[in-house]
């Protein structure tokens, strides 16, 4: 709705026009599909290779070894602290957005006003749930939540496809995908400076900062669970499949919202009066069984944020723990709880006193320092790809009988 009625100046589209609808769809695909998962995947591959194949220390700073050599490891603690700070800001922004969405749904279903008090309760429940899940063990808790999450998303998507404006959604999604591919580079690099347009800072740059704030810690978690996978499998699992699903999800839900808005259902007015979190429930009101679907959707949003917070809290606690190895990857339960409570408090303060503007400021604050780190990780991955054997050399790992013995990674300089 924002992009439909306030398009960027370079689009040349009139607010609320059909051209603006195309622009809105291209922007949704830009901000939420292939680019974010590409950022995550590059960082994930770098960390996974360094941790498992180079047997470096469990630290984000270790991912810079391919680019700068062994000497960079003396700064591991500083790099980890910066990334932890950035993620707390990024998670507070994302958790704040999710809290507002859930708060809007509770107000819609139960009539409980979406306000700081209800937000505090929502955040507390989310944090308690993901801390319990995290304490239960990284693979056990997250596997259960992810399995539930995926199935519920599929059911909701199929429901919309069957009962929504199916032909319009499918056709407009395909057309929008073509327009997105055609204008990908122009939209990705647009800053609005020459036109004096602040749109890019408010939207795509805000999202880039948010993705970047999450990237290093997400890379640690995703990289940690990639043991035994090939690089090709890792790219398929972390980039291709999520991007395709996100394209379908964003395509169908966004085109449905545009269809109803262009046909006079007044979604934009609802957004202005009740907040952006109210629009998705207005979409569900146009479908059968809304009284069942809306609580169903609230559940899926809740589980989504629990799953994301669970994985990242585990990774954050791991960075604060000495002795994390390939065999022993669990950190103390109390440390996970400390991080969960810290993020909860920051989120509540952020949305209660600063609202949407506070969420955007937190994302920008978290993403900026990580931008340089991710660029260095990408450069390191290119170096690895150019000559992987240079970084994949060890002293003997096995004795003559094939039994594993303690190995010691050779410094990069000795492998050249």
Image (tube, rainbow, N blue to C red):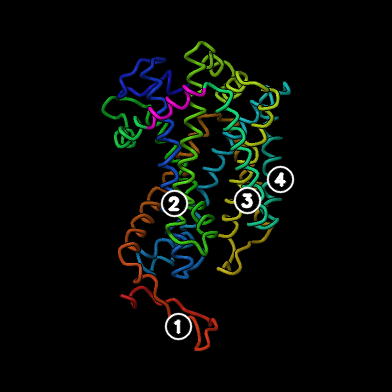
Foreground mark, 1 or 3, reads 1
Q: Secondary structure at mark 2?
A: helix
In primary-sequence order, the first of circles 1 and 2 is: 2
The part of the image, by quadrant, that contains residue 62 is bottom left
Per the image, the residue denoted by label 1 is 396
Q: Secondary structure at mark 4?
A: helix
Foreground mark, 4 or 3, reads 4
Mark 1: give few (<14), some (14-19) or many (20+) Cα within 10 Å.
few
Is 247 situated left or right of 281 in this image? left
Residue 369 in view of the camera: no
In primary-sequence order, the first of circles 4 and 3 is: 4
Q: Secondary structure at mark 3?
A: helix
Per the image, the residue denoted by label 2 is 41
Q: Position of residue 370 (x, y in %)?
A: 43, 49
Label 1 and label 3: CA atoms lie apart by 39 Å
The part of the image, by quadrant, that contains residue 270 is top right
Q: Secondary structure at mark 1?
A: loop
Per the image, the residue denoted by label 4 is 128
Label 2 and label 3: CA atoms lie apart by 25 Å
Which stretch is magenta? 166-177
Seen at 65% across and 38% down, the residue is 302
Mark 3: give few (<14), some (14-19) or many (20+) Cα within 10 Å.
some
In the rendered view, tell whether residue 357 sits above or below residue 40: above
Is 287 situated left or right of 362 in this image? right
Foreground mark, 2 or 3, reads 2
Seen at 38% across and 69% down, the residue is 71
Mark 4: give few (<14), some (14-19) or many (20+) Cα within 10 Å.
some
Label 1 and label 4: CA atoms lie apart by 46 Å
Q: Is 173 contained in the magenta span?
A: yes
Label 4 and label 3: CA atoms lie apart by 11 Å
Per the image, the residue denoted by label 3 is 339
In primary-sequence order, the first of circles 2 and 3 is: 2
């Amino acid at each position: 709705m924002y992009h439909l009625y306030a398009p960027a100046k370079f689009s040349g589209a009139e607010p609320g026009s059909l051209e603006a609808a195309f622009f809105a769809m291209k922007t949704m695909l830009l901000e939420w599909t292939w680019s974010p998962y590409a950022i995550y995947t590059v960082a994930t591959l770098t960390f996974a290779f360094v941790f498992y194949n180079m047997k470096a220390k469990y630290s984000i700073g270790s991912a810079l070894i391919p680019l700068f050599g062994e000497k960079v490891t003396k700064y591991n603690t500083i790099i980890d602290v910066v990334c932890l700070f950035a993620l707390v800001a990024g998670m507070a922004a994302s958790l704040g957005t999710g809290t507002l969405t859930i708060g809007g749904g509770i107000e819609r279903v139960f009539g409980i006003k979406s306000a700081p008090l209800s937000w505090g309760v929502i955040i507390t429940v989310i944090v308690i749930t993901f801390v319990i899940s995290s304490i239960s063990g990284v693979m056990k808790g997250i596997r259960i939540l992810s399995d539930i999450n995926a199935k519920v998303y599929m059911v909701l998507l199929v429901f919309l496809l069957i009962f929504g404006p199916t032909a319009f959604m499918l056709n407009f999604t395909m057309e929008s995908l073509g327009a997105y591919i055609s204008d990908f580079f122009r939209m990705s690099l647009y800053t609005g400076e020459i036109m004096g347009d602040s749109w890019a800072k408010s939207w795509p740059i805000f999202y880039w900062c948010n993705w970047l704030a999450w990237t290093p810690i997400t890379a640690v978690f995703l990289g940690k669970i990639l043991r035994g996978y090939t690089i090709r499998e890792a790219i398929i699992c972390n980039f291709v499949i999520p991007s395709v699903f996100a394209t379908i999800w964003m395509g169908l839900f966004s085109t449905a919202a545009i269809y109803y808005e262009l046909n006079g259902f007044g979604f934009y007015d609802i957004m202005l009066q009740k907040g952006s979190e109210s629009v998705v429930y207005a979409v569900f009101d146009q479908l059968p069984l809304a009284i069942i679907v809306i609580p169903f959707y609230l559940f899926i949003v809740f589980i989504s944020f629990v799953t994301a917070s669970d994985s990242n809290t585990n990774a954050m606690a791991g960075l604060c723990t000495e002795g994390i190895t390939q065999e022993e990857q669990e950190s103390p339960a109390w440390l996970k709880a400390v991080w969960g409570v810290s993020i909860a408090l920051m989120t509540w303060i952020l949305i209660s006193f600063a609202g949407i503007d506070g969420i955007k400021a937190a994302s920008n604050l978290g993403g900026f320092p990580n931008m340089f780190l991710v660029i260095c990780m990408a450069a390191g991955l290119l170096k690895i790809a150019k000559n992987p054997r240079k970084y994949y050399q060890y002293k003997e790992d096995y004795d003559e009988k094939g039994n594993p013995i303690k190995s010691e990674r050779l410094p990069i300089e000795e492998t050249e």
